[in-house]
Image: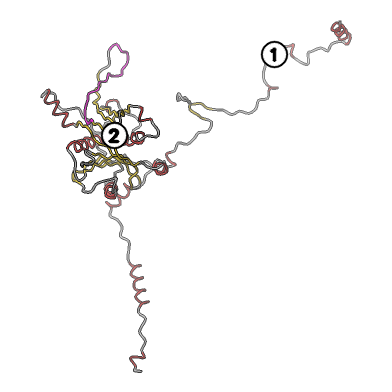
């Protein structure tokens, strides 16, 4: 054997592994910028969550009817809504929801509305909610009739050119939401979860008290004949009658927009366990229970007081001489015998 054949190959693998481990230790995790840190903090969970944001999307093809309704719904949601003008190809929430979840999480929106139009499902509007970055529940509505702000303005101007602009919702105003019909209270139907979904879309910011001057519109949802009819009214406040004897103003309702007739199509509601997780409140928000204090049905606060057992022998009563034990005289034995004879006779 030659000298070249006698030499053994060098073990180079352990040295390479050692070099790789040293490089891994030297790599530092890149810290996010100040802007990215603020965005991450804004999207992080909070004890008191922000007002729900809504995103309004257009599908591959949208009709004029459902497109105008989507625009009016976004105006009702302002300033807590984002209307996207671009079309989103292959935006079908019931078939594939990955792109919808991505856009909702990117824009930090927990509510979404998608407008589509096809031969199979014409004038289609999908409303839904998200929880923890995924879709919680959604419902598909077919728009059979619609009246938008633009179409209402054209009719008003044609009837009276000097009528002016149609009364619309002011920015930041709270609506008065009314649900009419017995179908909303049926426990095993689709209308009960649909009421919760519609209420989330139109109620806006949660407040403890409402100024009467900021209440400028009423939204009514009526369930009848398998349809859901949405009507919007402008609320006009007038001076109270002089002889009424109260300061409550007179009210008048004027038909406004949007107004639409929906028919419920496909639905995907959340399971009971998932809904329980979504509705769970932190411990900081739960009211502390006060001992021995309760509230009646009329709102009165009732308290219960626990006292020690009273000693009735020390109870102060009316002072009567005949009841005093030390002043009572014993009867003579002869009188006792006479009374016994009288009783026997």
The residue under label 1 is 319
Give the residue drawn at x 21%, y 27%.
256
Left or right relative to 31: residue 316 = right
Query: Nearest the camera: 241 or 34?
Result: 241
Task: Check the picture and name the quadrant holding the N terminus.
Answer: bottom left
At which x and y percent is residue 26?
Answer: 33, 67
SS category of the residue bearing label 2: helix
**Residue 216, above or below 289:** above
Give the residue drawn at x 81%, y 12%.
329
The secondary structure making up most of the magenta span is loop
At which x and y percent is residue 193?
Answer: 36, 36
SS category of the residue bearing label 1: loop
Query: Nearest the camera: 233 or 282?
Result: 233
Q: Earlier in the sequence, mark 1 or mark 2?
A: 2
The residue under label 2 is 202
Where residue 320 sits, quadrant-wise, is top right
- Specify the segment rendered in magenta: 242-259
């Amino acid at each position: 054997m030659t000298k070249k054949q006698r030499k053994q190959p060098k073990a180079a693998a352990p040295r390479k592994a050692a070099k790789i481990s040293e490089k891994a230790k030297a790599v530092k995790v890149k810290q996010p910028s100040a802007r990215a840190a603020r965005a991450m903090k804004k999207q992080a969970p909070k004890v008191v969550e922000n007002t729900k944001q809504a995103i309004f999307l257009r599908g591959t093809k949208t009709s004029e009817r459902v497109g105008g309704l989507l625009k009016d719904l976004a105006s009702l949601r302002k300033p807590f809504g984002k209307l996207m003008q671009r079309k989103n190809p292959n935006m079908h929430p019931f078939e594939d929801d990955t792109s919808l979840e991505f856009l909702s999480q990117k824009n930090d929106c927990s509510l979404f509305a998608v407008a589509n139009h096809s031969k199979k499902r014409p004038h289609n509007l999908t409303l839904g909610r998200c929880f923890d970055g995924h879709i919680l529940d959604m419902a598909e509505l077919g728009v059979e009739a619609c009246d938008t702000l633009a179409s209402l303005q054209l009719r008003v101007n044609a009837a009276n050119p000097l009528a002016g602009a149609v009364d619309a919702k002011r920015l930041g105003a709270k609506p008065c939401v009314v649900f009419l019909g017995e179908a909303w209270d049926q426990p095993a139907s689709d209308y009960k979860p649909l009421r919760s979904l519609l209420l989330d879309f139109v109620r806006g910011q949660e407040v403890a008290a409402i100024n009467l001057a900021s209440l400028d519109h009423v939204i009514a949802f009526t369930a009848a004949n398998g349809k859901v009819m949405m009507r919007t009214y402008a609320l006009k406040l007038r001076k109270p009658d002089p002889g009424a004897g109260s300061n409550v103003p007179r009210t008048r309702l004027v038909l406004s927009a949007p107004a639409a007739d929906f028919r419920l199509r496909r639905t995907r509601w959340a399971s009971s366990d998932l809904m329980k997780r979504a509705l769970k409140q932190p411990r900081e928000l739960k009211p502390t229970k006060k001992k021995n204090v309760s509230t009646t049905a009329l709102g009165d606060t009732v308290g219960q007081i626990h006292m020690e057992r009273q000693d009735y022998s020390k109870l102060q009563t009316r002072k009567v001489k005949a009841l005093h034990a030390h002043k009572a005289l014993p009867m003579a034995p002869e009188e006792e015998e006479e009374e016994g004879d009288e009783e026997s006779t």
